[in-house]
Image: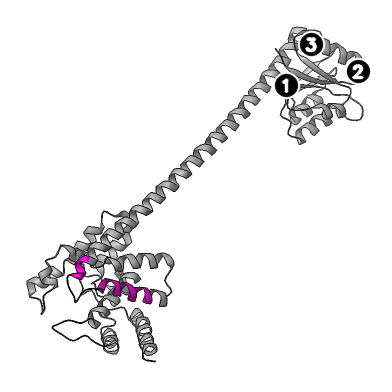
């Protein structure tokens, strides 16, 4: 057994005798004449510390207390000729591992206690090594997981952007087939963002609102173009078909889990605050602010855009219509904010 043991005893004869005994059992021994010297010699290479209790200047208890303060995790055996219970209690409270009595009468028992202390030290070392290896492994796995998560987030972002670009292209292609609806999506998006800014919406809400505005009419992709492009008023059957586009749009968006909020806005962008809208007849309390904003922006653009079966309204006329329907079709607070925005922009344009 190749173990390193530190013994501290002020009695030269005892110190020398114990060193010879331990060396005989195959241990490497370092001897100190006092507790102070032992503290100066101690390092993590030692397996066991043997301390005499009664030493001048710094006794064994004081030495162990200093070792504890330095977090020295090495088993300590007290060497004493006194069998006082007070000594035993004090030693246990300080964390001593065991006692060795002197003079040493039973070498085998002496060595058994030393070997048990060495085994305890080895157990503590293995435990510390396991902890270090576990912490290292956890750190490496955490780093690896973070890197994979970063790549996954980057991939997810690219996939979202690609999906949005494809959908935007499809919708733009649909709108370009009808001169009256060309640019409608861009204008609704622009009006929605102006209102969002004036209403001091959060950045997160603005991102959601912009996406919802960009795809609010995507359900029209699967509706017969003859209805959308019809130069005059729609028949009842055609109108019922057109009214399905919010539901269809929500269904198109449904597989895209990153657009859950946008899907609800798309489904409800033709609802009215009095519950007379479609497809679900939601009331103002059931509609969120983003939906109320798009409803206003969409209606305003429809009123101010040219149609061959009616003239387009001016800004002032459209605002008046929004206000007239405020509280029944549109949210009153959002209408007033929007009115200030578009009327102020009109005034600046005139100047």
Picture coordinates of residue 185 (x, y %)? 27, 71
Can residue 243 be seen? yes
Q: Which residue is mark 2?
A: 11
If you read the primary sequence from the N terminus, does the residue marked by circle 1 or circle 3 appear first? 3
Q: Secondary structure at mark 2?
A: loop
- Residue 37 occupies which quadrant of the picture? top right
Closest to the camera, between mark 3 and mark 2, is 3
Q: Secondary structure at mark 3?
A: helix
- Distance from the alpha carbon under mark 1 to that under mark 3: 14 Å
Q: Which residues are magenta?
A: 173-195
Instruction: From the viewer's side, name the closer residue of 217 and 237.
Output: 217
If you read the primary sequence from the N terminus, does the residue marked by circle 2 or circle 1 appear first? 2
Figure check: 263 above or below 197 = above
Answer left or right for 185 relative to 152: left
Picture coordinates of residue 69 (x, y %)? 77, 36
Instruction: From the viewer's side, name the closer residue of 12 and 321.
Output: 321
| Residue shown at the point (39%, 88%) measured from the top left | 348
Q: Which residue is mark 1?
A: 47
- Distance from the alpha carbon under mark 2 to that under mark 1: 22 Å
Picture coordinates of residue 303 (x, y %)? 23, 82
Figure check: 79 above or below 176 = above
Picture coordinates of residue 240 (x, y %)? 11, 70
Q: Which residue is mark 3?
A: 23
């Amino acid at each position: 057994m190749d173990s390193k043991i530190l013994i501290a005893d002020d009695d030269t004869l005892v110190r020398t005798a114990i060193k010879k005994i331990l060396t005989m059992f195959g241990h490497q021994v370092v001897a100190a004449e006092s507790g102070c010297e032992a503290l100066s010699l101690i390092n993590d290479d030692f397996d066991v510390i043997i301390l005499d209790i009664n030493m001048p200047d710094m006794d064994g208890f004081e030495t162990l207390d200093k070792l504890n303060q330095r977090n020295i995790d090495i088993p300590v055996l007290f060497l004493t000729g006194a069998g006082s219970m007070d000594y035993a209690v004090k030693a246990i409270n300080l964390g001593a591992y065991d006692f060795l009595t002197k003079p040493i009468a039973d070498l085998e028992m002496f060595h058994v206690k030393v070997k048990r202390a060495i085994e305890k030290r080895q157990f503590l070392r293995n435990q510390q090594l396991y902890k270090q290896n576990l912490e290292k492994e956890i750190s490496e796995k955490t780093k690896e997981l973070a890197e994979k998560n970063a790549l996954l987030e980057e991939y997810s972002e690219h996939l979202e952007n690609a999906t949005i670009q494809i959908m935007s292209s499809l919708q733009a292609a649909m709108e370009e087939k009808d001169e009256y609806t060309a640019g409608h999506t861009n204008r609704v998006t622009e009006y929605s963002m102006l209102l969002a800014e004036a209403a001091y919406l959060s950045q997160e809400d603005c991102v959601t609102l912009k996406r919802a505005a960009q795809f609010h009419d995507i359900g029209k992709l699967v509706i017969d173009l003859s209805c959308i492009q019809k130069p005059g008023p729609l028949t009842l059957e055609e109108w019922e078909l057109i009214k399905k586009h919010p539901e269809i749009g929500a269904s198109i968006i449904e597989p895209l889990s990153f657009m859950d909020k946008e899907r609800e806005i798309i489904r409800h962008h033709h609802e009215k605050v009095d519950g007379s809208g479609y497809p679900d007849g939601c009331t103002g309390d059931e509609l969120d602010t983003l939906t109320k904003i798009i409803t206003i922006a969409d209606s305003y653009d429809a009123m101010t855009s040219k149609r061959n079966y009616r003239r387009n309204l001016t800004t002032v006329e459209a605002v008046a219509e929004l206000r007239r329907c405020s509280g029944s079709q549109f949210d009153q607070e959002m209408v007033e904010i929007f009115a200030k925005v578009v009327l102020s922009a009109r005034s600046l344009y005139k100047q």
